[in-house]
C-alpha cells in the first residue's frame, strides 16, 4: 500500500509506505510511516520516526527521529538518534543511545551503550555495559566490563568482570 506523498513500496507483500517520501523495500507486513522513513525487508518491522530506518529482521521498531534498527528480532530504538544493532528484545531508549546485539539489554541513559550480553542495563548519562549478564551501569560515566550481576553505581565508577561486584 502506498498512501504517503512521494512514497514507494518495492516488492514484498502487505507492506505500507504512508509517510511523506517513505520507502519499504521488500519483506512482509512492514510499515514506513515516518517522514522520510525506510524499512528494508524483513517482517513486521516499523519505522515511524522522522528519518528513521529498520534494516531487516523481524518485529523491530524505530520510533523516534533519526533512530535505526539493524536486523535482529523484537528490538526497539525509541530514543532520539538512537541505534539498535541486531540481537533480540533489546531497547535503545535514551537520546543518542546504542544497544548492540545480545538479548534483553536496555540502553536508557543519554549517550549510553550496551554492547552485547544478556539482561544488561546502562541507565545514566554516558554509561556503558560491555557484555556479561545482568550487569548495570547506573552512575554517570560508569562502566561495567562483563561478568555477572555487577553494578557500577557511582560517577566515573568501573567494574571489570567477576560476580556481584559494586563500584
Image (cartoon, grey):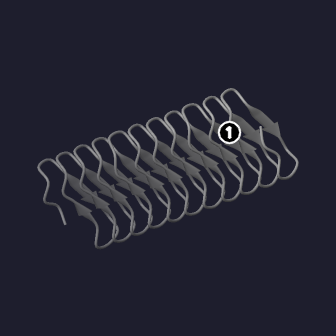
Q: Position of residue 63 (x, y in %)?
A: 34, 51
Position of residue 89 in the picture relative to residue 139 (left or right): left
Q: Residue furthest right?
A: 162
Residue sitting at x 76%, y 33% = 158
Q: Position of residue 120 (x, y in %)?
A: 66, 53
Q: Is 26 in front, or is 124?
A: 124
Residue that badge 1 annotates: 153
Residue sitting at x 22%, y 54% = 8
Q: Secondary structure at mark 1?
A: loop
| On-image quarter of the N terminus | bottom left
Position of residue 66 in the picture relative to residue 116 (left or right): left
Q: Position of residue 162 (x, y in %)?
A: 88, 48
Q: How many marks?
A: 1
Q: Neighbour class for label 1 at 10 Å: few (<14), some, many (≥20)?
A: many
Residue sitting at x 40%, y 49% = 78
| On-image quarter of the C terminus | top right
Specify the quadrant of the image occupied by residue 2: bottom left
In the picture shown, does residue 67 fall above or below 134?
above
In the picture shown, does residue 83 fall above or below 45?
above
Q: Is 78 in front, or is 124?
A: 124
Specify the quadrant of the image occupied by residue 45: bottom left
Amino acid at each position: 500500500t502506498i498512501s504517503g506523498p512521494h512514497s514507494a513500496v518495492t516488492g514484498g507483500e502487505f507492506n505500507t509506505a504512508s509517510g511523506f517520501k517513505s520507502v519499504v523495500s521488500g519483506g512482509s507486513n512492514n510499515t514506513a510511516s515516518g517522514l522520510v522513513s525506510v524499512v528494508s525487508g524483513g517482517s513486521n518491522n516499523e519505522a515511524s520516526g522522522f528519518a528513521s530506518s529498520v534494516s531487516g529482521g523481524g518485529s523491530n521498531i524505530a520510533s523516534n527521529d533519526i533512530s535505526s534498527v539493524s536486523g535482529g528480532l523484537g528490538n526497539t530504538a525509541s530514543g532520539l538518534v538512537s541505534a539498535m544493532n541486531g540481537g533480540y528484545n533489546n531497547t535503545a531508549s535514551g537520546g543518542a543511545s546504542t544497544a548492540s546485539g545480545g538479548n534483553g539489554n536496555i540502553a536508557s541513559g543519554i549517550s549510553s551503550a550496551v554492547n552485547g550480553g544478556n539482561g544488561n542495563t546502562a541507565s545514566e548519562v554516558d554509561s556503558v555495559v560491555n557484555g556479561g549478564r545482568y550487569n548495570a551501569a547506573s552512575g554517570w560515566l560508569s562502566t561495567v566490563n562483563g561478568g555477572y550481576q555487577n553494578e557500577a553505581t557511582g560517577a566515573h565508577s568501573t567494574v571489570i568482570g567477576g560476580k556481584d561486584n559494586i563500584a
